Amino acid sequence: MKIRRKGKLSEGEWVILWESKRRYLIQLEKDKTFYYHKGYVQHNDIIGLEEGSIIKSSHGGNLLVLRPTYADYILEMPRGAQIIYPKDIGTILVWGDIYPGARVLEAGIGSGALTIALLQAVGETGVVISYEIREDFAKRALINIENFLGRRDNHILRLKDIYQEIDEEDKDIDRVILDLPEPWRAIKHIDKVLRPGGILVIYTPTILQVQKTVESLESFKSFTLIETIETLLRPWQIESLSVRPYHRMVAHTAFLTIARKVLTKEENIFQKALPSVENEENFEPN
Ligand code: SAH
């Protein structure tokens, strides 16, 4: 059942029960009970509530009831493979310039976290094609996607090894996102299907993978403006006099390497992108 965004909470919907800093993702079912360390609450008492209500548990606990945001949902949904974190998904969507109507190819589907964001960004007029070798992961991912977005007929799953080939039909691709252990092995196939002007984003946890990926991209005549970035997201504590970064943060997830497809590049020119943080001239002193 698709996540609804508005209105009173109804049977079948997914909701988040927030307890201070913990959160529980549950699907509302008639006559079911939710148990946790502070007792239980009846689903029947949640069905019909407005989002933002607080419900009391049998042992006096308070739970705040809200619909899951996309980020809540992907962090709490069941996983096969490790997901891409929200901070990196945000960057992928903007650096990868995923737009409504785009034809996007991704590999692998993993748990489907990125796929949901891609489907939302391309909208109903776009298409997302996911390559995945593990059928068990793909099945889990499809359930995760359907639970959040409902059934989508603009999502195509190919149970295939992308290192081997990309289907004939998957031509004229606007954007490609790779989250694979050896992405350089897929680049020769992507070179054939990504349209000129198209963007390739590659997610890799280690810098050795980045180096191999960039070397591989550079060996092609048709990938340019190559850049590698990392997104660091630092949460802050704002509590009376204690206004400072939290002691803990997610220190590392992965690097993103981005490249642009061209018809043919001039050797050694346009190979590397300027750091796309800001315009060069904005750095010049007045
Ligand atoms: N981006 C996903 C996580 C992907 S994990 C998410 O956000 O949820 C990496 C996935 O790539 C795994 O599911 C793995 O099975 C798949 N994979 C690895 N090698 C592959 C290949 N050669 N072709 C297709 N999929 C592959």
Image (cartoon, rainbow, N blue to C red):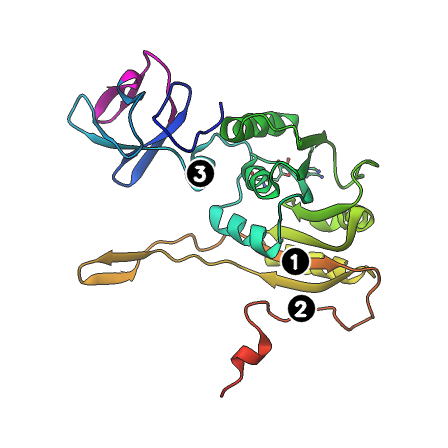
**Which residue, given by chain and number where applicable, does mark 1 sit on?**
258
At mark 1, the secondary structure is strand
Q: Is residue 221 left or right of residue 83?
A: right
Other residues around mark 3 within 10 Å, as few (<14) / some (14–19) / many (≥20): some
CA gap between label 3 and label 2 equals: 33 Å
- The residue positioned 60% from the left and 25% from the top of the image is 139
**Which residue, given by chain and number where applicable, does mark 2 sit on?**
273
CA gap between label 1 and label 2 equals: 9 Å
Type of amino acid under label 1: Ile
At mark 2, the secondary structure is loop
Q: Nearer the viewer, residue 234 or 120?
A: 120
Quadrant of res 91 = bottom right
Q: Is residue 181 left or right of residue 186?
A: left
Type of amino acid under label 2: Ala
| Residue 246 visible in the displayed image | no
Pointers 3 and 2 in contact (C-beta within 8 Å): no
Circle nearer the N terminus (1, 3): 3
CA gap between label 1 and label 3 equals: 25 Å
Type of amino acid under label 3: Leu
Q: Nearer the viewer, residue 37 or 61?
A: 61
Name the quarter showing ligand 1: top right
Q: What range is drawn magenta here?
A: 26-44
Q: Is residue 92 above or below residue 41?
A: below
Badge number at residue 224? none
Pointers 1 and 2 in contact (C-beta within 8 Å): yes
Other residues around mark 2 within 10 Å, as few (<14) / some (14–19) / many (≥20): some
| Residue 26 visible in the displayed image | yes
Quadrant of res 167 = top right
**Which residue, given by chain and number where applicable, does mark 3 sit on?**
75
Q: Is residue 279 above or below residue 60?
A: below
Circle nearer the N terminus (1, 2): 1
At mark 3, the secondary structure is helix
